[in-house]
Amino acid sequence: MRKTSIHVARIMGLLASALLVACGNSSSSKVVVSTPAPLPAPIETLQGQCTDKPWMLVSASPDARANSLLACMTADEKASLLGGDDAVGVLGQSATDPHTGTSLGVTRLGIPTVYFTDGPVGVRQGSATAMPAPVALAASFDAALAREYGAVLGNEAKFKGNDAILGPCVDIVRNPLAGRTFETYGEDPLLSRRIGVGWINGVQGEGVIANAKHFAGNNQEPNRNVLDAVIDARTLHEIYLPAYEGAVKDAKVGTVMCAYNSINGAFMCENKPLLSDVLRGEWGFTGYVLSDYPATHSTAPSLNAGLEFELPSTAFYSVQNINAAVASGSLKQTTVDQAVLRILRTHFAFGVFDRPRYKNDDAQIDKTGHAAVAQKVAERGMVLLKNSTSLLPLNALTTRSIALIGRDATIHKTAGSPSSGRVTAFSAVTPQQGFATRAPNITLTVDDGNIVARAASVAAAAEVAIVFVSSDEREFADRPCMSLMCSQPAYGDQDALVRAVAAANPRTVVVVISGSPVLMPWLTAVPAVIQGWYMGQQGGAALARLVFGDVNFSGKLPMTFWAADADTPTAGNIARYPGTPGSTVAGASFTATHSEGIFVGYRWADANNKTPQFPFGFGLSYTSFAYENLRVRASGATVTVRNTGQRAGRETAQLYMALPAPSAAVAQAPWALKGFESVELLPGESRDISFALDDRAFSYWDASSKGWKIAPGCYRLRAGDSSRDLRLAPTSLALGGGSCP
Ligand code: BGC
């Protein structure tokens, strides 16, 4: 309540100062006028100022400029800025209307039209650089690489004429079956936060507005539009919100997309507790909220809750609806003004008014440079899951023949069709092409794997067999189970294919192309497994370099790879997932209760003694690393990592903490990720890796005081190369007046 009134006071103050700026500078020679043509007859009392367009004074603050512009707008003009103007852009790929969304400007006032495009994997407009799936980026555990990834997308969005890009997707993987898992950064809030922040910085560094989506609790596809997700405040703050908080506080994201679902009784696009109290009140968000396509449910309640902009078009935010709501008293004109201000101040802050329109012209794009980033991310993101006989790396000089088996050996496998995660690549290197280019002297045989017996005999005839299996993932549907048979039935029994190939050739490597964990019932039968993710357009080249050891594996799993469907937090509990029919929320007919609380991913596995197929944070290398000498202070921890193998390699050291539970009702996960850093080490080289720790790292969300608290007690820390690496004994630290045994 107090925060709200402070906020209103601040707005009023800004309004007053903006008008001063507007009046004081009306004759300034610094005024930049975008259109020299005289304006029509002045409309308001600020006639002179309006004619001079004082909001074009670039030295004034975005808030001041937005306020001075607002003062010159008619009610209709204001309302017209609150909704999208292109209902079909979402279909994408149209030559005449290639953007995903459009907000028409107001010519009279020089307000520019603003264009939006999808999405988190690459620009969904014509052809673009097809990046590896975001989940592969997360596997790099590297925010600097995320920034490079974001910069590619921001740059291409810009050179395709867009002002904003609808990404990143920082939803947490609650359930590995979720169809959009590949678009995310995995199951851990700290990892998602850091990767998301890097990505947004990359995009916004290109002068393009990023969009953190889908706020919040957008955890499943089935019934998502009619689903009330029941999530307690602590779980929201500790698991589902930190990546959004980072987007707002650390990266100053320009826009946030409210999700389709409802949380705790209110649809996200009219969820005042989250849109106003948390997003703006707790975090100080100064951008604007736009709706998913279409996730708006109302006019006045949504505007009152904090949704500023409806996409893709104006089902609820039409000029007529807004004017009618104001006339009826259900919506105040000041609320409309505030929404307009937030949109305008964001566009001023991002320079939309001060630059020529971005031109939609692919010729401006550095395709070669961007392909190099796509390849780097693929190389850094693929995860070596198994290499038991040191089958890998293959020697490109001595290997004589390789059989490439499976349909995806000869294509660039993508996910996400037909929606925001789909990208049509500028060009692509298939695995077959990658191997042929890297090792032209090796005889490559190819078999699509459709006839298992034939594939086995092709495998038997080659020195090494590489078999590609894949899963098909997208918006609109979750996978029914984690087995490959569920993931992509059209490919037939891929598990049987792997078994047959492995039986025919003991030197078999499996490459899994998926955005989420798949079950590997053949794991003991094969010596080597690579989690390739959706590799992006340079995937074939990246894979070949990794397989031949030109570059070492360094990717780590950003989510638990479960051993069985029954092991996941939501398994066997339909009230959790997919939810049960019935809801107290008007418009929602399903309820999904997140009663597992904070126990998502490895937190669940650790607390319930589930042994994963591969744990969170896991990934092998062609070299080996030793961890020594963990030193812990309240402000941070340091561990020494040594390359004990024969090759140079990159290691991502991870710091996990066991927090004391303040009470039985506030259970803590056995271990939670609190830091990660990666380092390149030559053979024999060692380096100290430091992890900064702030108060938040030691805190839990206290629902009763609605704040972060440090429980008195003993905090144990350990460092290692995965969530299950217990090589180093934990080191303890007493805090908050507590003590350690
Ligand atoms: C998706 C968003 C996407 C939008 C526009 C929606 O269905 O949830 O992620 O940006 O469509 O394509």
Image (cartoon, rainbow, N blue to C red):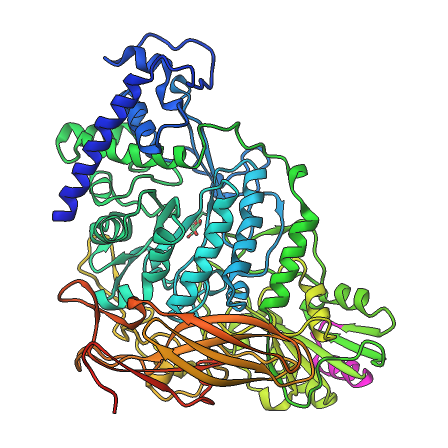
Q: Residue furthest right?
A: 441
Percent position of residue 604, x then y: 35, 80
How many numbered markers are drawn?
0
Percent position of residue 249, x then y: 34, 53
Up-down relation of residue 275 to residue 111 (above or below):
below
Percent position of residue 223, x then y: 34, 60
Percent position of residue 27, x then y: 36, 12
Residue drawn at point x = 42 percent, y = 71 percent: 691
Q: Could you tell me if residue 75 is visible in this image?
A: no
Q: Nearer the viewer, residue 591 or 189?
A: 189
Please check the rendered image and state whether residue 215 is part of the magenta-colored stretch, yes or no. no
- Specify the quadrant of the image occupied by residue 156: top right
Residue drawn at point x = 34 percent, y = 71 percent: 635
* Horizontal relation, residue 9 to residue 520: left or right: left
Residue drawn at point x = 50 percent, y = 53 percent: 120
Q: Which residues are magenta?
A: 447-462
